[in-house]
Amino acid sequence: MPPDITPGKKRPIALLIHGGGHVMFTRKEVNLKQIQLLHAAGSLPVSVDYRFVPELNIIDGPMNDVCEALGWARFQLPELAPTLALGFEADGEKLGAVGWSTGGTLAMTLAYTTAQRRLRAPEAILAFYCPTHYEDVGGNAPSIPRHPSPHRMKIMIISRVSRRNR
């Protein structure tokens, strides 16, 4: 824990989501220097794990788990933080999601998966070098995760058009 904790000052939460292709790595793979930078900026970094594919599909596993983690961080962590360290407070009203590689993809899904659970989406999403366009192995059809929600995000894929124009 950083030495510069101001007692009674709420810190915004940075929900850290690791990469690994939805099949490997853990919350422990988040770089310590990045955690230190977030601390120095006044945030409370919280690194999360999620269940892997193919044990579960991407919607019921990783996407569900990071959405659950966001709900926990918003509503339960602010109550727990003071019991973990004297003067340590978390601000559940200010939460950003940070993800690397496929963790960045999962962070971006929080923009719409939270609405299905009547949760507020993150105030900010920071996604580093993450995949945003999936295609089938043959490259013939888009492979976009579908949600049963009527609030489904519409995604327009324009890469096919740009490839034809080359």
Image (cartoon, helix red, strand yellow):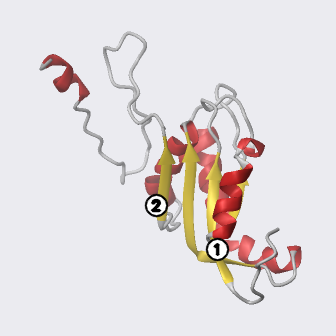
Q: Which disc is residue 73 wearing?
A: none
Residue at 64 percent of width and 29 percent of height? 53
Total marks placed: 2
Mark before the other along the chain sequence, 2 or 1: 1
Task: Write down the quadrant of residue 164 in the picture.
Answer: top left
Residue 138 position within the rendered picture, expressed as x and y whole percent measured from the top left: 38, 9
Compare residues 7 and 55 and report the one nearer the observer. 7
Crowding near the residue tagged with mark 2, few <14, some 14–19, many ≥20 C-alpha atoms within 10 Å = some
Q: Callout 1: helix, strand or loop?
A: loop
Residue at 26 percent of width and 33 percent of height? 157
Taking the view exactly as shown, the residue that stands out farthest to the top is 138
Q: Which disc is residue 42 wearing?
A: 1
Please tell me whether residue 116 is drawn above or below residue 162 in the rendered image: below
Report if residue 59 is visible in the image.
no
Residue 55 as seen in the image, left or right of residue 133 = right
Tell me the distance, in whole angstroms, between the alpha carbons under discs 2 and 1.
28 Å
Find disc 2 in the rendering and name its residue.
Answer: 115
